[in-house]
Image (tube, rainbow, N blue to C red):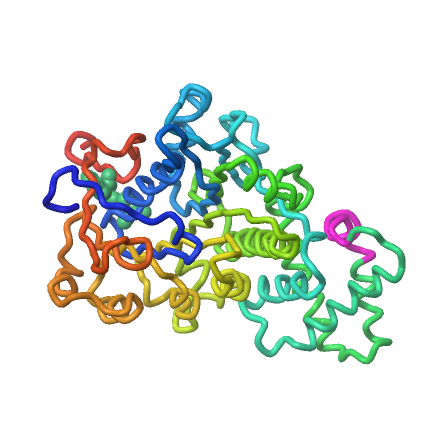
């Protein structure tokens, strides 16, 4: 607790399935404190002698969590008694992974996607959104694409995914057939443009042909069963030259396979848990008011957010501009970690958290770096707490975010 030295505050892990949100301007301490929370979540006390670890996928927009991968790489997980996870992996884009000069390690894997894990509607919507930024006004194009996929299936092809990078000619042949199915020439032209853009996923980024654990939904079994941690590296180092919409697509793909797999778990009465941490959430789950392409991920994340506590798949949305994050998804978050916010966000933060005491609300824009107001269901007392984690308490020290201007000059 801020002002009380090392006095700890209890947080209720059972409330994680009800989703978390972390707010604060750049440099207010979001990544530092989220890292600290992660250190707690890999070592949750069960009783006097046993500890457990929470499975996590982290969309790491700036490489803030790579310190953990390097730390485990240097020390070996088997020597790190305080981390109870089964494994930790960093995922980078194939275009950097395959470069000979890329520094390889057992813990680094390439990102890959498998279109066969998506249903026809999901795939059609993803293709349209990748090109247009939205599915609005594209109903004809979506039904055209779905029809193409159906025709291809009827013709006996077993994998759409393979056609998308090996046999594009076959795909375009079936798009042409839409003429006989009552589709307008303009719709067919639009579909061709969308497909051409979509082929970039392979031609530019090699996302379809690369061999990657993410291409099988066994990945979700593995991470939840073995309490893994997957860090999806969207930083300039792990995703060099990759545009935002391609990152959005990867994130949507992950959200989709997670949602589908957790739905399957629920139907089969299997209880699994996973925390999906998303840095720069305004880019991946934007509100309609935010002037970037309406995200591909919107419908999947809302679907995840609306599921109740039994679902076990929870979100931790981190953002420097909470007003730009999808309001519906944010309104499902029940625990908030609020750092210093910008004046434009004050009223939004007050309303989304269900109100803050006047004394705290007045401090929202002046909190110290690292100081965080913790409020909501995970807090076990009926009022918000102000917390500051002493730097020494972080087991793995963050290496980025430090500046040393004068020395370097
Ligand atoms: N509790 C803290 N104690 C000491 N330094 C901190 C604390 N929280 C953050 N910092 C430092 O402040 C800087 C910004 O923190 P960071 O977590 O990167 O902010 P954000 O993710 O909100 O942009 C970093 O150099 C970090 O090490
Ligand atoms: Mg950060």
Which residue range is magenta in the image?
160-170
The one nearer the camera, 279 or 375, is: 375
Disc tally is 0
Task: Report whether residue 69 is seen.
Answer: yes
> Residue at the spot x=71%, y=75% of the render?
187
> Residue at the spot x=63%, y=59% of the render?
197
Left or right: where does residue 139 sit relative to residue 54?
Answer: right
When asked about the image quadrant of residue 341, the answer is bottom left
> Residue at the spot x=15%, y=54% of the render?
367
**Is residue 405 placed above or below 341 in the rendered structure?**
above
Say which quadrant the C terminus sits in: top left
When asked about the image quadrant of residue 127, the answer is bottom right
Left or right: where does residue 211 sit relative to residue 309?
Answer: right
Horizontal and vertical percent position of residue 347: 23, 71
What kind of secondary structure does the magenta stretch mostly adopt?
A: helix
Horizontal and vertical percent position of residue 61: 41, 47
When asked about the image quadrant of residue 361, the answer is bottom left
**Residue at far front of view:** 48
Horizontal and vertical percent position of residue 131: 59, 64
**Residue at far right of view:** 155
- Asked if residue 169 is among those painted magenta in the image, a careful observer would answer yes
The one nearer the camera, 376 or 172, is: 376
Left or right: where does residue 88 sit relative to residue 270?
Answer: left
- Asked if residue 264 is among those painted magenta in the image, a careful observer would answer no
Horizontal and vertical percent position of residue 283: 42, 59
**Is residue 117 placed above or below 192 in the rendered structure?**
above
Task: Report whether residue 200 is seen.
Answer: no
């Amino acid at each position: 607790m801020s002002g009380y030295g090392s006095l700890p505050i209890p947080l209720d892990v059972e409330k994680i399935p009800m989703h978390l949100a972390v707010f604060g301007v750049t440099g207010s301490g979001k990544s530092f404190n989220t890292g600290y929370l992660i250190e707690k979540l890999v070592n949750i006390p069960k009783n006097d002698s046993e500890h457990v670890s929470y499975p996590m996928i982290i969309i790491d927009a700036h490489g803030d969590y790579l310190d953990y991968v390097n730390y485990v790489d240097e020390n070996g997980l088997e020597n790190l008694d305080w981390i109870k996870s089964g494994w930790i992996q960093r995922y980078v884009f194939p275009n950097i992974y395959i470069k000979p000069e890329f520094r390889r390690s057992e813990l680094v894997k390439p990102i890959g996607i498998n279109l066969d894990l998506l249903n026809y509607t999901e795939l059609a919507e993803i293709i349209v959104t990748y090109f247009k930024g939205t599915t609005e006004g594209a109903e004809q194009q979506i039904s055209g694409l779905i029809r193409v996929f159906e025709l291809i299936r009827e013709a006996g092809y077993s994998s759409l995914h393979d056609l998308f990078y090996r046999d594009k000619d076959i795909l375009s042949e079936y798009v042409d057939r839409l003429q006989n199915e009552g589709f307008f020439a303009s719709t067919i032209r639009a579909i061709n443009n969308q497909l051409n853009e979509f082929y970039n996923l392979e031609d530019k980024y090699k996302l379809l042909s690369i061999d990657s654990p993410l291409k099988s939904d066994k990945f979700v079994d593995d991470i939840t069963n073995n309490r893994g941690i997957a860090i999806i590296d969207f930083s300039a180092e792990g995703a060099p030259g990759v545009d935002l919409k391609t990152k959005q697509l990867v994130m949507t793909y992950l959200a989709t396979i997670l949602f589908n797999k957790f739905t399957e778990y629920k139907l089969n009465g299997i209880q699994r848990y996973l925390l999906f941490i998303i840095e720069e959430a305004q880019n991946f789950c934007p509100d309609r008011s935010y002037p970037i392409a309406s995200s591909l991920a919107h419908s999947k994340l809302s679907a995840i957010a609306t599921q109740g506590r039994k679902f076990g798949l929870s979100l931790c949305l981190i953002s420097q501009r909470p007003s730009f994050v999808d309001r519906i998804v944010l309104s499902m978050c029940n625990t908030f970690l609020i750092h210093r916010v910008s004046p434009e966000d004050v009223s939004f933060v007050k309303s989304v958290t269900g109100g803050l005491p006047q004394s705290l609300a007045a401090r929202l824009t002046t909190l110290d770096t690292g100081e965080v107001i913790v409020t909501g269901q995970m807090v076990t007392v009926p009022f918000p707490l102000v917390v500051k984690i002493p730097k020494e308490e972080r087991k793995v020290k963050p290496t980025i975010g430090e500046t040393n201007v004068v020395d370097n000059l």
